[in-house]
Amino acid sequence: MAVYAIVIHGGAGTIRPSSMTPEIEKVYKQGLQEALQAGYSLLEKGGSSLEAVKAAVMSLEDCVLFNAGRGSVFAKDGSQEMDASIMDGTTLMAGAVAAVRNIRNPVELAYTVMMKSQHVMLNGKGAYDFALAQGIKTEPAEYFHTPHRYKQWVRMQGSEETALDHSVPPEEGPSSAEITEGKKFGTVGAVAVDQLGNIAAATSTGGMTNKQWGRVGDSPIIGAGTYANNKTCAISCTGHGEPFIRAVTAYDVSCLMEYRGLSLQEAMHLVVHDKLLKIDGEGGMIGVDAKGNTAMLFNSEGMYRAMRNSNGQEEIAIYQ
Ligand code: ASP
């Protein structure tokens, strides 16, 4: 049987031990552990990589700690808009939603776009109407609202500045009380390879604080924030979306493997530590290939991340 594996991330940015307490760190790691388990247990039972990445990302969207779904960052006008995508490396089928509001699990809607529509990406009101027609769960605006995100946004309100959710000054980061009360911080993603050697990727985010409403990041763009192809790799990115879009980041890793014969690790290293840095692309990515190789690379100070495979390897980490 081929090696099966899952890798997840909970966002990258300026994450420093000095802005953490052991208590906060523990809660983040627990959130990652639960999502890892949600995906891995499906792989263990012979489930598909597509189902595994969807389950892991939904767990992170539902987990009160991470910025995807509930607790998403605020846009310039005080609204909360979310992006998500999913891709199946076996069929190259993909689904995505951009700038959606009130959707409890944007990745589930992206999956439904892929399975039940003729399209790859839906946005805004059209995506919302499609969600209602498909019976996808919605929530009122208050469900997505958290005091910490609101504070971050108020600081930047009226400016042209935008920020990665993890790159706020430590004094404006979550207090341990907020964390334990269940506020959430961090874009999320998952990649997996199943027992048949099929791979898949998914990403979900609230985007960047103080973004222009209507702004779409890299996360829902197939080839930029998310990509999967059994021939090469499955990738989910996190970081400053605009450079990631301009670098066609996730697909670039796949191209380097396909056309230049690089390994997953080599291709990701070149993109994260060379190509992205040259265009101020702060962030990172997780990847897997059909043989079960995995990698988690970033050029920021930290990236919430975790992996587990059927060889018994498991890792949960935050800093470099
Ligand atoms: N890439 C996301 C975006 O630009 C943000 C993040 O990964 O934290 O929307």
Image (tube, rainbow, N blue to C red):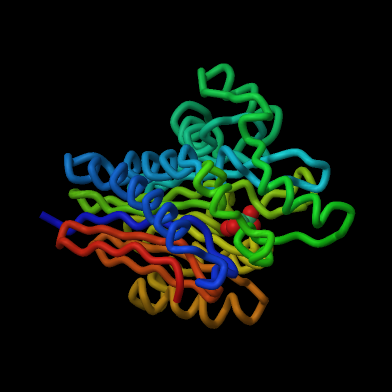
Of residue 70 and residue 286, the one placed in the foreground of this image is 70
Q: Is residue 194 left or right of residue 299?
A: left
Q: Toward which corner of the image does residue 80 lie, by quadrant? A: top right
Instruction: Relative to 149, say whether 29 is above or below.
Output: below
Residue visible at 59% across and 54% down? 175
> Residue 151 in the image: x percent, y percent?
74, 50
Residue visible at 63% across and 59% down? 173
Q: Quadrant of ligand 1?
A: bottom right
Q: Is residue 68 left or right of residue 28?
A: right
> Residue 55 in the image: x percent, y percent?
37, 39
Residue visible at 54% across and 36% down? 106
Of residue 237 and residue 61, the one placed in the foreground of this image is 61
> Residue 311 in the image: x percent, y percent?
15, 62
Instruction: Relative to 89, say whether 119 is above or below.
Output: above
Residue 186 visible in image:
no
Of residue 271 and residue 93, the one placed in the foreground of this image is 271
Residue visible at 68% across and 48% down? 149
> Residue 234 in the image: x percent, y percent?
39, 58
Count of residue discs:
0
Quarter containing the C terminus: bottom left
Q: Toward which corner of the image does residue 126 lie, by quadrant? A: top right
Residue sticking out furthest to the right: 158
Residue sticking out furthest to the front: 177
Residue 70 visible in image:
yes
Instruction: Relative to 273, say whether 231 is above or below.
Output: above
Quarter containing the N terminus: bottom left
Q: Toward which corner of the image does residue 26 lie, by quadrant? A: bottom left
Q: Is residue 73 left or right of residue 180?
A: right
